[in-house]
Amino acid sequence: MATISPRTVLVLGGGSDIGAACVAALAGHGTRDVVLAARRPDEAVRTVTDTLGIDPQLDGERDGPTTAGPRVHGLEWDALDTAATGPLLDRVVERWGLPDVVIVAVGRLGHHAGLGLGPDEVDTMVRTNFAGPAAALSCLADRLADGSGTERAVVVLSSVAGVRTRRSNFVYGSSKAGIDAFALGLGDALAGSGVRVLVVRPGFVRSSMTEGLDPAPFATDPDTVGRSVSRAVLGGRSGVVSVPGVLGPLFAVLRVLPRPLWRRIAGDR
Ligand SMILES: NC(=O)c1ccc[n+]([C@@H]2O[C@H](COP(=O)([O-])OP(=O)(O)OC[C@H]3O[C@@H](n4cnc5c(N)ncnc54)[C@H](OP(=O)(O)O)[C@@H]3O)[C@@H](O)[C@H]2O)c1
């Protein structure tokens, strides 16, 4: 059994609703500092402090963990600027030490991420969901596996959309498949180092990303994903976690269905 204590939690893509719910679910287990790396750090801090139910104004002033919850810090970061990730992580380590838990929550959906998407949009989608986070994961691995054997967790938000791509959103789905495979391979490469990589595959989650979309079957909410992530991290799990759990066995079957049948089942959603 692992002994991860989530004292410092770093979220890449810090404004994410699911990321905020993961932070909230971990916070009661001894979190002192939450660092949010985001394009809009002030908004990210607001999202997370709202989710935690704490006053963002107090953050700079509290100098230790209090009953009011962890301190929440925002740093500017863009996943597409791969050269910026190393210096960002060095800043985090210098100020707060190596994070115990890192949540990679960067993502871009696009409501019809399939046929007809222009080359620039495809490029942005692939770089946001795959290339940027993959580059960040490499930087993280270099720093987290420091030879001390200390238990740490890296949580990568993948998606069932990457398990089998659908015609309506294969650009998004394939980019999530890329980061999913990268993270699983990284997890194998880090086995024995103390750093565990957890690949989380939610189905449809009601968040900012899916606003205005009709929920898919087995739709869930950020809090449910947060609780699953917290349980898995604190329980020392690595590998794949599907949310809700039923999607794991379901997609194991769906991914091997004959293609014409899959096209019919997936339809246009
Ligand atoms: N919602 C779902 O149904 C669902 C299902 C399965 C998997 N997921 C995955 O879960 C993760 C979190 O999604 P969510 O539902 O919490 O949606 P969300 O609230 O929209 O979070 C996505 C975050 O990614 C950030 N981001 C986008 N491009 C970025 C960039 N270039 N650099 C830095 N940050 C960037 C966004 O920041 P801005 O506000 O600056 O755009 C946003 O804060 C994503 O990886 C998503 O693919 C979501």
Image (spheres, grey):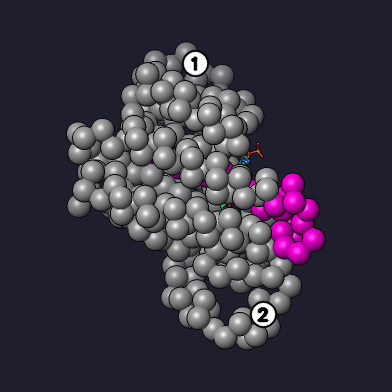
Amino acid type at mark 2? Arg
Residue at point 45%, 49% (across, down): 156
**Residue 263 marker:** 2
> Does residue 59 appear left or right of residue 65 in this picture?
right
> Does residue 252 appear left or right of residue 169 in this picture?
left
Residue at point 62%, 25% (across, down): 42
> Does residue 161 appear left or right of residue 4 in this picture?
right
Q: Which residue is mark 1?
A: 60
Give the residues drawn in magenta, as a range: 101-122
Amino acid type at mark 1? Gly
Find residue 55 and report its horizontal and vertical position in percent.
54, 25
Query: How many angstroms separate mark 1 from mark 2 (CA)?
Result: 52 Å
User: What secondary structure is marked by label 1?
Assistant: loop
Residue reaching furthest to the front: 119
Number of numbered discs: 2
Residue 108 in magenta stretch: yes
Counting residues from the start of the chain, the first of labels 1 and 2 encountered is 1
Q: Main secondary structure of the magenta part?
A: loop
Regarding residue 31, the answer to whether it shows in the image is no
Residue at point 57%, 86% (across, down): 258
Residue 98 in magenta stretch: no
- As drawn, 119 above or below 177: above
User: What secondary structure is marked by label 2?
Assistant: helix
Find residue 231 and report its horizontal and vertical position in percent.
35, 53
Indicate yes or no: mark 2 CB to ligand 1 under 8 Å.
no
Residue 96, quarter of picture: top left
Residue 263, quarter of picture: bottom right
Regarding residue 140, the answer to whether it shows in the image is yes
